[in-house]
Image (tube, grey):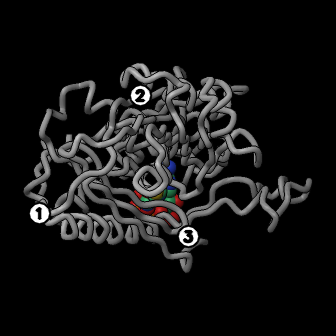
Amino acid sequence: MNKKPHAMILGTGRALPEKILTNADLEKIVATSDSWIFERTGIRERRVAEPGVPLSVLAVGAARAALEDAGIAATEIDLIVLGTVTGDMKFPATACLVQEQLGATNAAAFDISAACSGFLYGLQIAAALMASAGYRHALVIGGEVLTSMVNWEDRDTCVLFGDGAGAVVLGPSDGRRGLVHGVLGSNGAFSQLLYNPGCGSLNPPTVANVAEKLHTIRMEGREVFRHAVTSMTTALQRALDEAGLTAGDLDLLIPHQANMRIIEAVTKRFGVVTEKVYVNVERYGNTSAASIPIALDEALRGGRIKSGDTVGLVTFGAGFTWAAAILRF
Ligand SMILES: CC(C)(COP(=O)(O)OP(=O)(O)OC[C@H]1O[C@@H](n2cnc3c(N)ncnc32)[C@H](O)[C@@H]1OP(=O)(O)O)[C@@H](O)C(=O)NCCC(=O)NCCS
C-alpha cells in the first residue's frame, strides 16, 4: 500500500421503507415469475416507499443513523453531498432539504447526479474537498426512490429496482484508516442504453410526454449487463493498481447490488471468493446510489468488517458512469 488515507468513515447509517414488494407480488402486476426474476437477477424482494414519502425522508433517516453512529452533532457537519437521480424536486437540491431537517446549519449542501455511481462519486468529491478546502466533517448520502420513475407495465425494468438510502460521516483520517484511493470514470456515448428521457428540458412533462411514459426508466438490459461487467472490472483493477494492492489484499468487496450475475462475473475475474463478497441484492433489488452505502452499513454493523480490514467498493451506472474506492478500516 503506497497511499495514505485522507478522510475516514466515522459512522454509517441506512434507512429503508417498510413496505416489501416480493416477486410474487410482481407476478400479479406483469407477466413474470419468481423463478425468472431470481435466476436472472438474484432478487427476491425490494422495498418500496409509500406514496408521499420522498427521498428526503429516507436520506434524513440514513443521515441521522450515521451521525448517531459517529457521535457527531449535525452542527459539526460542514458539507453534505447527496448522490441521487430521484430527488424530491427538480430543485432545490434534496441535500438542502436534508440539511434543514437535520439542523446542519453550518453545512454547504448539494446533490450530484451519477445514477448508481452517485455514492462513490459523492464520497470522492467530499474527500477531495476535505483535503483541499478545509472541510472537516462531511455527510455523504446515496439514496433513491427509484420506484417513482418505474414503468409498472414494463417487465424488463420494473422487477429490478427498489428504494432506500445509506449514509456515511467522514472525518479527518487518523493516518491509518480511511479512503486510500478512488477512481471515477464515465462514457456519455452510451447515455441512451439506460436513461429516463422525460421531465428534463429535452422532454418537459407535457400531457403528451407523460402519456408516452417518457418520465420512466428505459434500458437495454443485455448491453447494460455487458458494459457493467467490463467497466466495474476495469475500475476496480485501476483502483487496486494505483493503490499498490491486488485483489488478494481485499478482506471484503462490496460491489454495486444491481444483479447477482453481474456481481458473480466481476468477482470471478478477480478470483475473489464468495465469502469475501457482500451481497444483499436478494432483499433490496437495485437501489442505485443507495446500494453501496446500505451494504456498507450492514457489513459494518453485522461484523463483516473488522479493524484493519481493507475493503473494495465498485459500481457502475447510467451515464455510463463507474467508480471504485479502496478503504482501510
Ligand atoms: C435485465 C436482465 C435481467 C434481462 O435478462 P436477459 O437474460 O438479458 O433477458 P432478455 O432481456 O434477453 O430477455 C429474455 C426474454 O425474457 C423476457 N423477459 C424480460 N423481462 C422479463 C420478466 N421480468 N419476466 C419474464 N420474462 C421477462 C423478454 O421479453 C425476453 O423474451 P423473448 O425471448 O420472448 O423476447 C439482464 O439483461 C440484466 O441484468 N441486465 C442488466 C440490468 C441492470 O443491472 N441495470 C442496472 C445497471 S446499474
Residue 249 x, y percent position in the rendering: 9, 54
Mark 1 Cα within 10 Å, few/some/many (few <14, many 20+)?
Answer: some
Q: Residue furthest bottom?
A: 189
Q: How many marks?
A: 3
| Image height of 295 relative to 70, above or below | below
Which is more toward the observer, 287 or 307?
Answer: 307
Closer to us: mark 3 or mark 1?
A: 1
Q: Quadrant of the N terminus?
A: bottom left
Residue at the disc numbered 1? 246
* Amino acid residing under circle 1: Thr
Query: What element does badge 3 sit on?
Result: helix
* Amino acid residing under circle 2: Gly
Mark 2 touches mark 3? (CB < 8 Å): no
Residue at the disc numbered 3? 193
Question: In the drawing, what numbered circle is on residue 13?
Answer: 2
Q: Earlier in the sequence, mark 1 or mark 2?
A: 2
Q: Earlier in the sequence, mark 2 or mark 3?
A: 2
Q: Quadrant of the C terminus?
A: top left
